[in-house]
Amino acid sequence: MSLTYLIKRLAMAIPTLFGVAIVVFVLLRVVPGDPISMMIPPGARAGDIEHLRALYGLDKPILVQFGHWLLAMLSGDFGISISLRQHVLGLILSRLPATLELSVMAMLFASGLGILLGVAAVYWRGRWPELLVDGLSGLGMAIPDFLWGLLFILGLGVLLPVLPISGRLDPRMEVDFTTQFYLLESLLRGNFQVLGSLLAHMLLPAVALALPLTAAIARILKSALKEAMAQDYILMARVKGFSKARIIWREAFRNALVPTVTLSGVQFTFLVGGTVLVERIFSYPGIGNMAIGAVIDRDLPLIQGLVLTFAILFIALNLLIDMSYVLLNPRVRHG
Amino acid sequence: MSEISRRHFLQTVGAAGAVAPALGMVAPGRAARAQGSKALTIAYNVNLPSWDPTVGLSAVNPTIQSIYKSVFDQYIDQNPDLSFKPGLLTKWGWNDDKSKVSMTVRDGAFWHDGSPVTAEDVAWSLERAGDPQTGSPIQFVWGKIGNFKIDGMTVTADVKEFEPTLFKWMAFLTGYVMPKNAYGKLGAEGFEKKPIGSGPYMVEEFERNAFVRLKAFPKWWGGKPAFDSVVFKFVPDATSRVAEVESGSSDLTIEIPYEEYDRLRVKTGFAGASTPVSDIGMIFITNIPPMLDKNVRLALHHAIDKKAIVDRLLRGYGVPIDTLEAPQYAAFDPSIKVGYDPEKAKSLMAAAGFSPEKPVTFTIQTTRGFKPKDYEIIQAIVGMWRRIGAEANIEIYEIAKHFELRAQHKLAPAAFYNWGNSIGDPSTSTGFAMFGPSPHSAWKTPDVDAMIGPLWGEKDEAKRIAGYKAVDRYIADNGLVIPLFQYVQPIIYRKGLKVVPHVANYILPQTITPA
């Protein structure tokens, strides 16, 4: 992948983000629910309501509002949250690390378990482990992440209360973080007590988010591995007397990874989107949880900022996935 | 590929089990409970948006006042039965001609930074709240006094416009005393990061959208609270709140489905408390066809079996009402009755020219899931109306849409809503809900406005209350609104706690003690 290609891809992100900005801005102004109506105090007069509308710039035509918002955004000003009365960018940046850590943890879990299951299904092809993997992956895909979340809360939070079911960290812990990347920071500082609490709080939401993706990875990898195992170079490896495990891991696995990464990359974007409900259920303080609150309060600046953040995340993820092809597939690298 | 033996697997799991507690990977509730009775964890139903209880949208959000009241003091406080008691003011009142107010500030109260609460803090707080530039949503009340003068611990002010509920508002939304010096030094943004109050608890740690940890303030004038440490965990999902308490992660929760309340309150290790609160379910009637016909309006009201709704849909957790005044409110008049009478409802509909064969049709709007069983209640009511010759189409909307339509006077002929009023004054229930110029009313007609209008500035309190009772009777006689029931707040907590429910729907950790 050349630098030119990378620049081209980044340049293509600009019109995409602009399109998202237009859609979200217009959509929020045509859907029912006026934020000012929710702020009207009991004894307000017509003048007070107009004053509030002007205060938030909602008295101007939509085009003018959009222009002001766009110009401000380009200078890094995402506006002030109506409900939280703080800068939108600051609010998002304070909560984004929590969502990123949760998503990455879910992705690591899904990748690890999905690969193990996919390989196991091929290793024991035609035997009961393959049937088990098929059954489990079917179950994993059939049940949505938020339902897994509720099942975990009931099972591991209530019936067998071994794990915390809400928040990001035990509220009674005395910690002083420098960054919002709590997991990374506690790991680097070697604060294992806090790290343990963070992992415990993250485990159930991360697994709930990961299970549908785990199932997808297992399925895709299994079929890609099966296809690879039918190739001539695998036959050659068998003739050479290599063990089955070595043939799968050393010969077939790498080739099978390309379609797996492609499809699971798409699934990963859904995983990030899934944080909205899962974070709500587990009261996890990420941007997903914040998004629901913003929608309920009709906090237009915050919703706009959050949607753009999700859009940037999706674009970045797709770029990363494309870049990973280069590492996995020599034909792309040298093409 | 080597096989994993059963023994190896069990050894691995056992090792993980030993390491997990060392890393703190156990359910925190168990750990917290093990710390003894000095810590209290509350699974709370809403997030705290802002720490300034006097400005912005959150200042008028009744659901977060419990947290504000734990950290800040109000000028005047309320007992669990809504009666008023001293807060940071020990004495308050008007002069004879009600042209001046006088307030005595409590001696021996301190801010969380250790400095004393002064009369200057009180005067500054009131002045700030009355300044239109500050952004107080209740400026229309606070702006009615000015020209503050301080003499020792006494603050006096001139009345610019008489507001009979001024002192009641001092125990209501935005009625908090703020620290003049600390706020001046910190500024608005700094105050959000390091809020300083004079209430029973100090803010120790605040993780937005996650929790706030409070520490008992030993110098609080009301005495040191029973719990040294209190955590409000923000758990907006009701199912998760139930799980929080059931798993032992939290000691207490509120706003859970009545079915869950009934299940948990009899479960070993748990207890429940419930009380009717200052929140009512009602149907707004808009003065548009077919509601312009008095017979139709009254028929719709008489057709609703409120007791059956409370008993069957709310499992008995509700109190049927016939006016916008709940029994604990100042202008409650038990003699005003509308009553369930389907035969009378049918004859009224017949007089209006309608019957089950020839029904009147209109739309009723409701939220779904915003309040307990809101949609189901409206479904039941629509069924009752069908029997008397009214065919109502249910339109579901979000609460934000309700506010928008109400402010524009564009609600459907009937619209379900809930109305809170923790000070129990008639002006903040019947007044704002039924006075035409108010942006919150749906029925806007000169007859009602003529009755309510003079009461806004009535100086004779007995006359004012009697006036509102007369308005309530007129409204009931003419079917201008359909009050349904008073809500009941279910509180579930672990055994070993003593919780006194507050009619204002507050959960105040300073009033919770070990049993």
Image (spheres, coloured by chain):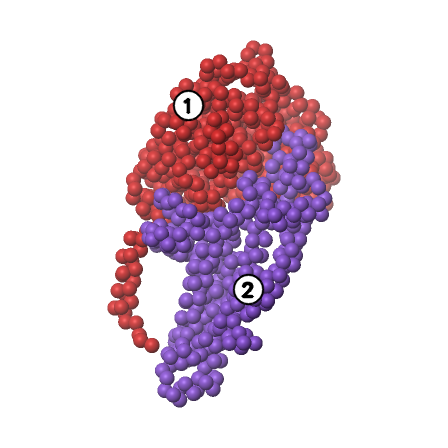
Quarter of the image where one finds residue B17: bottom left
**Nearer to me, B62 or A248:** A248
| Chain depicted in red | B
Residue holding disc 1? B116
Local crowd at mark 2 within 10 Å, few (<14), some, or many (≥20)? some
Number of the front mark, 1 or 2: 2
Residue holding disc 2? A319
Q: Is residue B101 above or below residue B22?
A: above
Q: Secondary structure at mark 2?
A: helix
Q: Secondary structure at mark 1?
A: loop
The x and y percentages for residue B268 are 33, 45
Q: Chain ID for label 2?
A: A
Residue visible at 58% across and 42% down? A80
Give chain A's shade.
purple
In the image as oriented, which residue stretches furthest toward the bottom? A239
**Nearer to me, B472 or B441:** B441
